[in-house]
Image (cartoon, grey):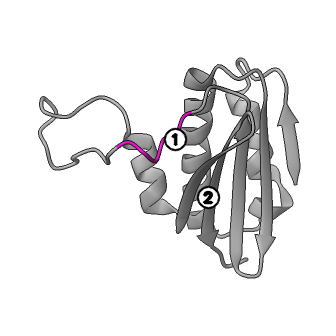
């Protein structure tokens, strides 16, 4: 399933619900749906708040025993994976702001990759699945 949202301002909930209602996600076990929802929320929030893009495409597909989720946007070039992981053992006073959402995605998903294709940011996440 590929779904394009144009414009994206204020559409975070629509985008998340669209992914969660897709055939590729709706039949996943509850624990996998939780991981997918949390990671989609984190990625979409980053795109909507920071990229400056007026559009977002989200594609989901199942290949063998793996769910693939790909986000594309036309925002400024930004690789969220290039930033160092936050020090989760540091006290709250010592922690830097930002990076926790992508860190969570990297912990929950099996693969998280970024690339710049032409004028688009492309973030891919993959997770092994079991259908109910």
| 103 lies above or below 77 | below
Above or below, comparing residue 99 to residue 39 in the picture = above
Is residue 23 shown left or right of residue 124? right
Residue at 48%, 41% in the rendered image: 80
The residue depicted at 28 percent of the width and 44 percent of the height is: 86
Quarter of the view holding residue 129: bottom right
State left or right for residue 87 relative to residue 53.
left
Q: Give the range drawn in magenta.
A: 78-83
**Chief secondary structure of the magenta span?**
loop
Residues packed near mark 2 inside 10 Å, few (<14), some (14 to 19) or many (20 plus): many
Give the mark count: 2
What secondary structure is found at the residue carrying circle 1?
loop
Q: Is residue 68 magenta?
A: no
Instruction: Find disc 2 in the rendering and name its residue.
Output: 125
Residue situated in front as seen by the camera: 36 or 44: 44
Residue 65 bears which disc, if any?
none
Residue 107: % across, % down: 42, 60
Is the residue 97 above or below the residue 86 in the image? above
The spot of residue 89 in percent (x, y) is: 16, 50
């Amino acid at each position: 399933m590929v779904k394009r949202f144009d414009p994206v301002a204020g559409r975070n909930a629509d985008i998340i619900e669209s992914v969660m209602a897709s055939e590729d996600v709706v039949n996943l076990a509850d624990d996998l749906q939780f991981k997918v929802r949390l990671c989609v929320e984190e990625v979409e929030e980053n795109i909507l708040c920071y990229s400056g893009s007026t559009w977002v495409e989200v594609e989901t597909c199942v290949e063998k025993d793996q769910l693939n989720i790909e986000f594309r946007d036309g925002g400024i070039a930004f690789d969220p994976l290039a930033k160092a992981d936050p020090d989760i053992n540091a006290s709250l006073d010592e922690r830097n702001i930002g990076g926790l959402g992508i860190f969570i995605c990297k912990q929950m998903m099996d693969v998280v990759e970024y690339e710049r294709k032409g004028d688009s940011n492309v973030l891919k996440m993959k997770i092994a699945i079991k259908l109910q």
